[in-house]
Amino acid sequence: GSDWRASVLQSYRNAEVRSIAEVLASLEPGATSSSKLMLAMRFEDTIFKSASSLADYRKRMTKRLKKLQKNYVPPATKPTGANDTEVLMLELRRKYGDALKYIVKNAKAAIADVKEKTGDERAKQLQQHTDSAVAWAKELGV
């Protein structure tokens, strides 16, 4: 059969990542969901890759988050703790800034091109991806 992952929209996964980031941030005083995004992305991706179906993905996600909330021990607070988020944001800006700017700049043309060549469905999928990139670019301030 076809892989269940192919039918999962990126926007659905992005929403999951955002909610994981919120849970992670709620566990650590002073943390923000933005500062937990990378960790949340890795957390979600691990579950997504190992799950056998969408139902299994949801079950594993719920179970892992509950376990995390129950057992979470925040890292020892360092005096420079407040700067960790800024360091991460700078790192992400440096690594992905140019690509995000390119996507933001060319999204409309690319979507129109895809719509013309392959139809509405593919164009909608690309729109979801570019919307995510635009949101991420705004969060990173690029």
Image (cartoon, helix red, strand yellow):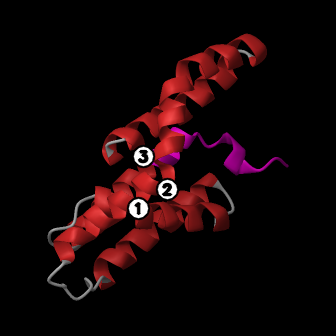
- Which amino acid type is shown beneath numbered disc 3? Ala
Image point (26%, 62%), residue name: 86
Q: Which residue is mark 3?
A: 15
The answer to which of marks 3 and 1 sits earlier in the sequence is 3
Q: Give the number of the mark in front: 3 or 1.
A: 1
Is residue 23 visible in the rendered image? The answer is no
Separation of marks 1 and 2 at Cα, in angstroms = 6 Å
Point out the stretch of residues depicted in magenta.
Answer: 1-14
Of residue 61 and residue 109, the one placed in the foreground of this image is: 109
- Which amino acid type is shown beneath numbered disc 2? Lys
Whether tag 2 and tag 3 are in contact, CB under 8 A, the answer is no
Tell me the quarter of the picture where residue 19 sits: bottom left
In reply to whether residue 7 is colored magenta, the answer given is yes
Image point (65%, 68%), residue name: 50
Q: Which residue is mark 1?
A: 91
At mark 3, the secondary structure is: helix
Tell me the quarter of the picture where residue 122 sits: top right
Image point (42%, 57%), residue name: 92
At mark 2, the secondary structure is: helix
* Residue 23 horizontal side relative to residue 115, left or right: left
Q: Which residue is mark 2?
A: 95
**Within-10-Å neighbours for mark 2: few <14, some 14–19, many 20+:** few
